[in-house]
Amino acid sequence: MLKNPVSTVVADVGLIVGAGLPWNRLAGACVAVTGASGFLGSYVVRTLLELGLSGRVDPPVRVLGVVRDLDGARKAFADVPADAALELVQWDLSAVGVPDFEPPEYVIHAASQASPRYYGIDPVGTFLPNAVGTAALLRWMQQGDNPQGFLFVSSSEVYGAAASPTPLREREFGTVDPAQVRSCYAEGKRAGEALCVGWHAQFGLPTYIVRPFHTYGPGLKPDDGRVFADFAFNVLRGENIVMKSDGSARRAFCYAADAVEAFFTVLLKGEPGIPYNVGNPEAELSVMELAELLVGLFPERGLVVERHAPASAGYLASTFKRLMPDVSALRALGWQPRTTPEAGFRRMIGAYQ
């Protein structure tokens, strides 16, 4: 049985709030976080709560956790003190409608089905929260008396089939075929970005965009379906890693705490209306190198990498051979990744043991 990784997430959050960011801007504010009980959303929620609990901001941040599954969210945050400034509310961001709660000063929109295992079975549910849901949240925030910042968590998938021998800058793009089912995620994120840019240009709403590349860490679920999660849980279960491709695709793997610190860096120090890549270019690995790294971290388990099994039914694999970020714009705000793949994956796997 896998251990609940929340203690490691809490420790990571302690490092995030230690970053030299202008946290005081959030003092006393209401921050709505969508996807609050999800992988990255829960990191964001716990960071905001810790700002008050640790005394870094006073008065504390009031967090409105917007979730689709209220019971599941309550279980996810069962360890949070009863007097913490957290309110969980239920709202389906696939619905066409503006939330009927009081508008907050900040919104962090992190609700999305990110795993390719959903793209083939629920393309509509993948697309709508990023497009229709983003429009609803922007309209909702606009109705408030003091909108301070809207952060849209986009994705590196917006780059499409960008054939670049060098790391991708924010203005470099390839193609995405909208008539392919797998494009539901990339096109939804593209639509969400366009809405954020439009709302900023037309209404002056301070919107911010982050494009995380491959992000991993404690809090991922065993059935996530992305290759880095599958491999980590293979190791946790004592299973050989079975390759479902030739393993040549190259990706940049960023630890969750580094990514969430980047999100807050953009929200508090970034320029509105423009996107920022979030990733760790020093952590580039091929899929095969990742598999070999993970079995090598735990040699006592005697695991090996097996090659060329058929892909799982319903999984729509990416056709992009290399996705690497240029994070110069983010570095200019003072952010740096801290975690190597060796340290990050060892920490992630250890969190479940």
Image: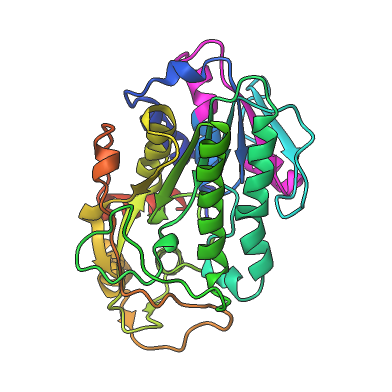
| Snapshot colouring | rainbow
State which region is magenta: 48-76
Image quadrant assignment for residue 287: bottom left
At which x and y percent is residue 319?
40, 78
Instruction: Let me know if residue 30 is in the magenta part.
Output: no
Number of numbered labels in the structure image: 0
At which x and y percent is residue 60?
56, 16
Residue positioned most to the top: 58
Nearest the eye: 39 or 267: 267
Whether residue 125 sits left or right of residue 199 in the image: it is right
Q: Residue at position x 68%, y 67% from top?
A: 124
Nearest the eye: 180 or 71: 180
Instruction: Let me know if residue 56 is in the magenta part.
Output: yes
Whether residue 155 sits left or right of residue 183 in the image: it is left
At which x and y percent is residue 177?
49, 75
On screen, residue 159 above or below 327: below
